[in-house]
Amino acid sequence: MEFCGCLPNVIDSNNFTGQLCNAKDEHECLSYLYRDSIYYVPQVVNSVYAIASALKEVFTQYPMLKWHHKSRDKTRRLLLSKLQKCQFEGFGNELFSFFNNRNGQPNFTILTFVPNTFKWKVLAQYDETRSPRFYYINENISSYIQETIPESVCSKPCNVGQIKRIDWGRSCCWICINCSSQQIVTSVNLNKNPKNIINNNVTNKNKSNPMASPMCQFCSPGYRPNKNQTKCQLLPIKYMSIYEKVAQSSVGISSTGLILCFIVSIICIKYWQTPIIKASGKETSIILFLGIILSYISGELILALSPSLFICNFAIFSVGFCITLTYSAILARSSRINSIFQDKNSQNSSSMNLSPRFDINLISE
């Protein structure tokens, strides 16, 4: 024991005149003494003790089983039951029992490689039955421990919105390529679908196909990728509802104008045969009132109804149609007044330009 400089407590000290080891020296001495055996000998010893302890309890409780060879199955069942519950003083005079009735108590020796000495050394030892569980920690070599745990992986899994591509520089590894925010990640059979725009219902259904390859694909018009960029979903429809304050204000102003237009129309109809109404042109007045009323009504209908194909087409058509109808009536009336002042001496010309048919033809053109 000269290499230790002291005598471990587990060794007989009758013929030893030196000093006994303290806890730290004893651990280093035993580690050097037993070398690698210190890591597996306790488990072997405890295994033998466990079998012996269980057999002892079985034959003590059922002494006749040892003489009956036909009762081996019963002996095995009893032995297994006793092993799960056995508890004894094992290696190193420590109490031993099975963990979760299956395995030995967790007992680990943590090693670390010291670069300066190029040797593996014990950093810490862990035992589930002790308190504290890390009953030994070597503070002298703790500075060699890295703060971050090295990862033993070739390539990390790709994140959302990325596709895998083989890294030919490293076997069995891949690189991750980002798709754009308007694309989804899907597996498409390139032999059947070479296009770069997919249908709305395309999802990752071809993953099991060996000919399928992960691709970045654009969604069809009217669709956009979901949050995980795995499938296309309909674009949310956002429109001005009649329940919004801005829409209600617009409808209120439009309704006021519509009511005033109806009032003026009723007054004109009441005095339909008066010289003022006749001079302004009955036909152009009707078309002018019709264009203004349709302008107010179309705006309220567009705000009141939810968007659809008909409503969207109606909104595009009504804006141009109502404005054209209104301005054409004003143009026809202005043209008629202009003809009155310019064609005083031309009796034939003035009669043609002042006729209602001429105004209707001008508006229709």
Image (tube, grey):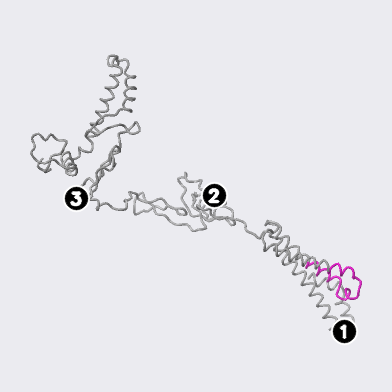
> Where residue 181 sits: x, y (%)?
50, 58
Q: Which residue, given by chain and number where applicable, does mark 2 sit on?
A: 202
Q: Which residue, given by chain and number where applicable, does mark 1 sit on?
A: 344
Q: Do the residues labelled 3 and 2 touch (CB within 8 Å)?
A: no
In space, the residues marked 3 and 2 are separated at their CA atoms by: 57 Å
Q: Is mark 1 on a helix, strand or loop?
A: loop
Residue at the right extreme? Answer: 273
Which residue is at a point 34% across and 54% down the rendered structure image? 169
Of callouts 3 and 2, the N-terminal one: 3
Can you say whether 60 is above or below 171 in the image?
above
> Where residue 349 sits: x, y (%)?
87, 80
Residue at the bottom extreme? Answer: 345
Magenta highlight range: 264-292
Residue 228 part of the magenta segment: no
Q: Badge 2 local density, few (<14 within 10 Å), some, or many (20+)?
A: some
In space, the residues marked 1 and 3 are separated at their CA atoms by: 120 Å
Q: Do the residues labelled 1 and 2 touch (CB within 8 Å)?
A: no
Which residue is at a point 86% across and 67% down the rendered structure image? 266
Q: Quadrant of the N terminus?
A: top left
Amino acid under disc 3: Phe
Of callouts 1 and 2, the N-terminal one: 2
Q: Are marks 1 and 3 in contact (CB under 8 Å)?
A: no
Q: Which residue, given by chain and number where applicable, does mark 3 sit on?
A: 118
In space, the residues marked 1 and 2 are separated at their CA atoms by: 75 Å
> Where residue 4 sits: x, y (%)?
12, 43
